[in-house]
Image (spheres, helix red, strand yellow):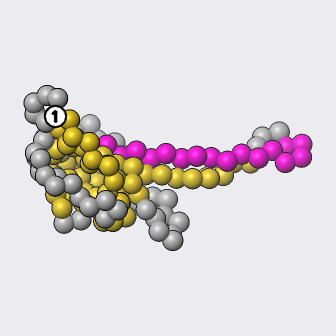
Amino acid sequence: MACSTNTKRIVSIAHGAVGLVDPVGGSIDREVQFGRTRPGVRKSPALWVNEVNHRARGDCQQSQTPIAVGTKASLVFTLQKLDEAGNVGVTITNMRAGNVNVNLDQEPHRWSHSFEHDSGDTDDLAPVSVS
C-alpha cells in the first residue's frame, strides 16, 4: 500500500449509529505481544504472536451523553483530504465503548472516548481497514 502525503482533517467519528459531536482528534493503537522459546540448542528463539490488542480514542469538543459502556460496533473515522478532492475512511470492526475522559480545565472542553477491540470467538488480527 502506497503512503500518501496528503494533509487530512477529521470530519466525523462514529461508533455504530452514534456520532461524536464536533470531532477534533483521535488515535488508533495496535499492541502486539510476542512469545519466545528456545528449545534445546536452538540459536534463535521460536517467535509467535501471543496477544494482539487494538485500542482507539475519539476526541470531540461538544458535550454529549457517553456511549453506553460495552456497546459493540464498528468505529469509523472519516478524514477529509485537504490537498485533493475526496475523503478517506478508517474503519475498525468490533470495537467496544469504554472509558470517557472529560477535560473541563480549558476552553474548548475536550471529551475523549476510548474503545477496545473485541474479536469475540474469532482470530481477527486485522480489524482495521482504510478506504
Disc 1 residue type (three-letter): Leu
Is 8 a magenta residue?
no
- In this view, 11 is above or below 95: above
Observer able to see residue 131: no
Look at the picture and state if 130 lies above or below 110: below
- Check disc 1 and report its element: helix, strand or loop: loop
Q: Nearer the viewer, residue 67 or 123?
A: 67
Which quadrant of the view contains residue 128? bottom left
Mark 1: few, some, or many residues within 10 Å (few <14, many ≥20)? Answer: few
Quarter the C terminus occupies: bottom left
- What's the magenta bit mostly, secondary-structure-wise? strand
Picture quadrant where residue 71 is located: bottom left
Q: Residue at position x 45%, y 47% from top? A: 30
The residue where tag 1 is placed is 104
Q: How many marks?
A: 1
Q: Is residue 15 left or right of residue 43?
A: left
- Residue 48 x, y percent position in the rendering: 66, 52
Residue at 89% across, 46% down: 40
- Among the 4 quarters of the image, the one containing residue 8: top left
Q: Position of residue 10 (x, y in %)?
A: 17, 45
The answer to whether residue 17 is visible is yes
The furthest residue to the bottom:
121
Does 26 appear in magenta?
A: yes
Q: Residue furthest right?
A: 41
Q: Is residue 31 above or below residue 127?
A: above
Which of the two residues, 100 or 49, is positioned nearer the viewer here? 100
Q: Residue at x 13, y 41 (%)?
A: 61
- Residue 91 versus residue 23: which sits nearer the camera? 23
Q: Which residues are magenta?
A: 24-42
Q: In x, y percent, where is residue 38?
A: 81, 44
Residue drawn at (26%, 42%) of the image: 101
Q: Position of residue 76 (x, y in %)?
A: 25, 57
